[in-house]
Amino acid sequence: MHQQHFIILLVFITVAFVSIVQCDTPKGEENNHRSRRATNVCDSTACNTPLTGLQNSNRFTSSDYVRNLLDPTFWVNTPGGNVSYFNLSTTPALAGVGIAFSLAMLEPCGIILSHIHPRGSKENKAQLILNTIGIGYATVIPQGAIHFVQNLDCANSTQLDAYNNEDPGLLTLGLNMFRFPDGPLSAGFGETDDYIDNLRQAIPNYPLDVNMDCRKKCGLST
């Protein structure tokens, strides 16, 4: 049986908190209630009076509190694997609960690229943590830490992630850094603008991808 492993790269951070604002539903907007819940956006009149806990609870039906993470219709399909989310954007009933989950199903050699969950702050010069995680292991990633996950095995792997915020967010470093102009990037890398342009073209378009050297060692297509 194949063993499944992960490498976790962490930079420790200080913790910050965010609050979730609940919005009331005025009369005459009952028909638009579900669509507004799906987008998690309120107009100015709807936000005048925050909901009580009881009012918020009564906004939802029983089915609003569950989500099948193994249902393929909910998966975000990218190179490197699939991810299924249970958070505020997919399940508005989580508002104020302070917890979220994601299920990552990585292909052989799949990688969740370096990223942070931005409901917190990060700082430089924190220590680097590097671990190989086997089947049945758990690990902690501090809020806001820069980290990545790589499946080092030649078989599929699955991991369940839990967050202490119902809306943890995702900011992939490479995808967002190279949205900046060439000037600050060439200065930061100590390279020319042409080098930055070539590097920008090579950045993956998705938060997940695969390690080609790993796939070659596994005898898989690249």
Image: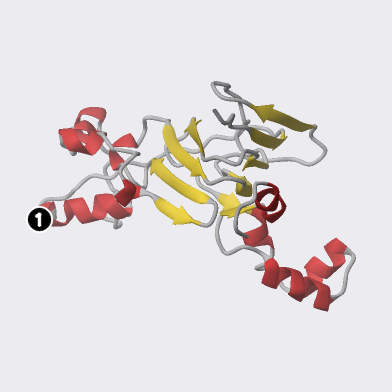
Mark 1 element type: loop
Image coords of residue 148 (percent x, y): 65, 42
Residue 159 versus residue 135 in the image, above or below: below
Q: Quadrant of residue 189?
A: bottom right
**Direction right: furthest residue:** 190
Asked whether residue 168 appears in the rendered view, the answer is no
- Residue identified by numbered label 1: 28
Give how far across and how far down residue 170 sits, in percent.
54, 48
Quarter-of-image position of residue 167: top left
Is 49 left or right of 217, judged from the image as shown? left
In the image, residue 131 above or below residue 197: above
Q: Quadrant of the C terminus?
A: bottom right
What percent of the width, then of the height, locates residue 20? Answer: 40, 39
Q: Position of residue 54 (x, y in %)?
A: 20, 28
Quarter of image, res 64: top left
User: In which quadrant of the rendered image does the N terminus lie?
Assistant: top right
Looking at the image, can residue 63 be seen?
Answer: yes
Residue at horizontal 71 percent and vertical 29 percent from the top: 131
